[in-house]
């Protein structure tokens, strides 16, 4: 029977809280309106943040699509540049050719093929000629 006074006390304290009025309005109503206002503001802020994130995601997806297209174009360019027929024609234009089988060295021949000192660069004959000879040779070279 000792719980009855506690229950009576808590009921009267709770009852007083709900009955407490400020200028004719109960405190519980004021607290309820304030909580609803806080919830409205927080929902609005969350919705605005979600819209910003959505636009950021759309921009990132657009960047990903553009970069993917660039990657595909670059891969196609690499494939075109690495075509064996194209490389072979370019190498033949500058005087390169595949190594012939009979020119390949065996392992025991490697010491004999040791790198020889690099030859001095050849100077063009035009640079050694006199300036008058260069001027005379220039019109002939053009024809």
Image (cartoon, helix red, strand yellow):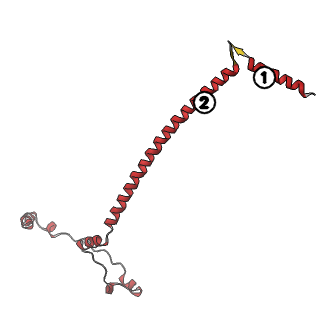
Q: Which residue is mark 1?
A: 14
| 52 sits to left or right of 86 | right
Which corner quadrant of the image does residue 127 belong to? bottom left
Q: Are marks 2 and 1 in contact (CB under 8 Å)?
A: no
> N-terminal of the two: label 2 or label 1?
1
Q: Residues within 10 Å of mark 1 (few under 14, many from 20)?
A: few
Q: Which residue in the structure is indicated by mark 2?
A: 39
Q: Nearer the viewer, residue 89 or 71?
A: 71
Q: Is residue 9 above or below residue 118?
A: above
Label 2 residue SS? helix
Give percent across and percent down for residue 65. 41, 52
Q: Quadrant of the C terminus?
A: bottom left
Question: Farthest right residue?
Answer: 1
Question: Which is nearer the eye, 137 or 120?
Answer: 137
How far apart are labels 2 and 1 at the CA level?
Answer: 25 Å
The number of numbered discs placed on residues in the rendered structure image is: 2
Looking at the image, residue 131 lies above or below residue 61: below
Measuring from the top left, give residue 118's x and y in whole percent.
30, 74
What residue appears at the point 9 percent right and 67 percent down from the top-left corner? 141
Residue at image coords 78%, 23%: 14
């Amino acid at each position: 029977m000792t719980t009855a006074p506690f229950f009576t006390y808590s009921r009267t304290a709770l009852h007083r809280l709900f009955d407490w009025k400020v200028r004719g309005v109960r405190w519980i109503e004021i607290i309820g309106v304030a909580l609803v206002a806080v919830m409205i503001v927080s929902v609005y802020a969350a919705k605005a943040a979600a819209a910003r994130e959505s636009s950021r995601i759309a921009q990132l997806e657009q960047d990903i699509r553009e970069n993917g297209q660039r990657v595909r174009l670059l891969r196609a360019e690499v494939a075109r540049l690495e075509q064996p027929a194209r490389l072979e024609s370019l190498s033949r234009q500058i005087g390169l050719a595949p190594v012939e089988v009979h020119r390949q060295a065996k392992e025991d021949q490697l010491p004999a093929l040791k790198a020889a000192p690099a030859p001095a660069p050849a100077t063009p004959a035009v640079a050694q000629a006199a300036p008058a000879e260069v001027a005379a040779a220039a019109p002939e070279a053009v024809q």
